[in-house]
């Protein structure tokens, strides 16, 4: 299957990767600062007291970004865990309709989640909600990342659903479930 918005999904994956790199950098800096302080104390000098305020808070928001921004990319590249033990035994003509049914359910859940996240971000923006940590980060920022991420997943699900419906309507017996191995062979 070829997804028309693959570049958009890749952008989300790059955002997830950037969040992971930022987490690693923050933790590395914090550990380095603590090591420097420990070495200074070891040689009899006083601590510098360097630290990054709110590292755990920043890392937790970045982790949410890393997790959710990659949802659409992992879906279109067949990297989500799927239990195909039962449906692999079904004939192609039946399997395609089962796939359509599952995609409709996944899309409905994702749309409800997306709607709820958009409303949550709007409410946080209206009431100027901020996090309760050291940094007082406006909550609409991470909530907007969540809503955007789930919105990308909804777009990917819509694309997959339309492709599955096209196959189901034209030639259901030709349906074959795409796998991650198919992706790697295409490159």
Image (cartoon, rainbow, N blue to C red):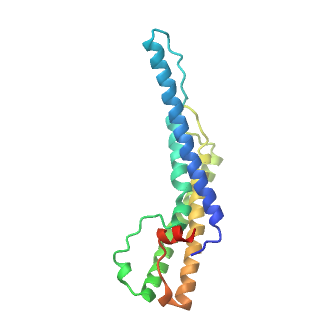
Q: Residue 84 placed where, x, y %?
A: 38, 74
Name the side, left or right, on which 88 lies relative to 54: left
Image quadrant for the N terminus?
A: bottom right
Name the side, left or right, on which 45 lies relative to 83: right
Image quadrant for the C terminus?
A: bottom right
Q: Residue 62 placed where, x, y %?
A: 54, 45
Q: Residue 56 placed where, x, y %?
A: 49, 36
Q: Residue at x 64, y 47 (%)?
A: 125
**For this rendering, which residue is in front, 168 or 174?**
174
Q: Residue 169 placed where, x, y %?
A: 55, 89
Total count of labels? 0
**For this rendering, which residue is in front, 169 or 88?**
88
Q: Is residue 78 above or below residue 174?
A: above
Q: Residue at x 56, y 46 (%)?
A: 19
Evaluate whether residue 133 shows in this view: no
Q: Image quarter for residue 61?
A: top right
Q: Is residue 75 above or below residue 100?
A: above
Q: Image quarter for residue 83?
A: bottom left
Evaluate whether residue 90 shows in this view: yes
User: Which residue, as the protein is rendered here, is positioned at the far top?
Assistant: 44
**For this rendering, which residue is in front, 108 or 64?**
64
Q: Residue at x 52, y 87 (%)?
A: 168
Q: Residue at x 50, y 87 (%)?
A: 174
């Amino acid at each position: 299957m070829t997804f028309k918005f693959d570049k958009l999904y890749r952008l989300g994956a790059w955002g997830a990767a950037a969040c992971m790199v930022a987490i690693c950098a923050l933790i590395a800096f914090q550990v380095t600062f603590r090591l420097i302080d420990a070495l200074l104390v070891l040689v009899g000098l006083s601590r510098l007291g360097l630290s990054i305020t709110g590292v755990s808070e920043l890392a937790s928001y970045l982790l949410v970004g890393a997790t959710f921004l990659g949802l659409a990319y992992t879906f279109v590249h067949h990297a989500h865990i799927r239990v195909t033990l039962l449906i692999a035994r079904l004939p192609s003509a039946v399997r395609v309709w089962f796939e359509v049914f599952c995609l409709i359910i996944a899309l409905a859940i994702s749309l409800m989640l997306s709607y709820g996240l958009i409303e949550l971000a709007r409410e946080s923006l209206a009431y100027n909600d901020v996090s309760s940590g050291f940094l007082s980060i406006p909550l609409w920022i991470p909530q907007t990342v969540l809503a955007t991420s789930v919105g990308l997943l909804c777009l990917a699900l819509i694309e997959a659903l339309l492709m599955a419906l096209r196959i189901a309507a034209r030639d259901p017996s030709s349906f074959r479930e795409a796998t991650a191995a198919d992706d790697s062979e295409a490159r």
